[in-house]
Amino acid sequence: MTQSILAPAATHARRLFLGWRRNPSAVINTLGTPILMTLITRAMFGDLIRAVHPKGELDLLPLTVMMVFAVEFMLTISTSAEMIREKRLGLTARFATTPSGIRSYIAGNLLFILFRMILGGLLVVAVAVPCGLRIHTITAGVWLAAFIVLAGLTAGALSVLIGSAFQTPESAMVIAPLVMILQFFNEGLMPANRFVAAVQPLAVNSPVSHAVRTATGLNDGTGVGDSLTFSLLWFGGLLLVFAWGALRASRRSL
């Protein structure tokens, strides 16, 4: 059963990759978004990050974790819109009638979307390094790499959910306000206690904040406490919910 899904899923992923490679706007969206978002955020908030750091240093690891999340979830908009366009063209219904069915189509989309997400996350790190990112321990580097994949999987499942549940490409924008809130109300820019009291609970308990505290704890040797556990629970739980919703939505949309 697994083998019968994997081969056609890989075929779908390859088809999507070749189409993406021939589409300059899609390539620019995937490559340009992480580069520009990281550079602009660094330019806008670099002085703030230095000012709130206990030693007055420019520690870009929290910002990098935050930007990995922001970039991958912002890419959800374009990737889900592309799925909706295929559905409107009748391709999704046509693929559903093949022997491998809708599951291989969904799996192929998820594989290709995950490729774009991971590529975006890696570009964030590549831009952050010359801007001042310093990783002092192997474990911090491993966590950053794992977070790129984990957040990419979660964002990919959300993309498939939106692409399956909605009928117009413009509907993909529904996720933008939530991403913007989670992008800035966390400890990627400054400690939670620096926020106004009304939003401190959100900043403390944000899934991004848990990922940031895990990265900084591993990087400076202070320990991660329960941040690693909560990071895995947050993103693992969201991944399961989005994946379940995507499977249900894909079957109901045919």
Image: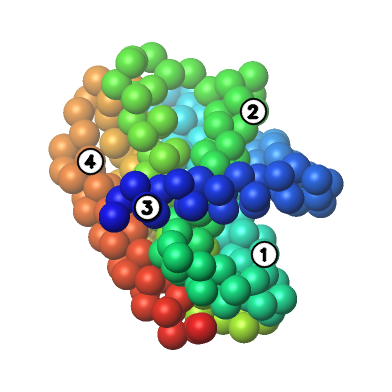
Label 4 crowd bin: few (<14), some (14–19), many (20+), radius 10 Å = many
User: Which residue ends up furthest to the right in the rendered image?
Assistant: 24
Three-letter code for the amino acid on which mark 1 is drawn? Glu
Q: Residue at x 36, y 34 (%)?
A: 146
Residue nearest the viewer, comparing 51 with 146: 146
Which label was assigned to residue 127?
2
Colouring scheme, one of rainbow, by chain, secondary structure, one colour: rainbow
Q: For mark 3, what is the residue?
A: 4
Measure how far apart labels 4 and 1 are at the Cα level: 34 Å
**Residue 208 appears left or right of 130:** left
Q: For mark 4, what is the residue?
A: 228
Residue mark closest to the camera, 3 vs 1 = 3
Q: Give SS at disc 2.
A: helix
Measure how far apart labels 3 and 1 are at the Cα level: 25 Å
Q: Are marks 2 and 4 in contact (CB under 8 Å)?
A: no
Three-letter code for the amino acid on which mark 2 is drawn? Val
Three-letter code for the amino acid on which mark 4 is drawn? Leu
Badge 1 or badge 2: first in the primary sequence: 1
Residue 95 coordinates in the image, percent (x, y)? 56, 68
Q: Give SS at disc 1.
A: helix
Badge 2 or badge 3: first in the primary sequence: 3
Q: Are marks 4 and 1 in contact (CB under 8 Å)?
A: no
Measure how far apart labels 1 and 2 are at the Cα level: 27 Å
Residue mark closest to the camera, 2 vs 3 = 3
Q: Are marks 3 and 1 in contact (CB under 8 Å)?
A: no
Residue 206 coordinates in the image, percent (x, y)? 35, 57
Which label was assigned to residue 82?
1
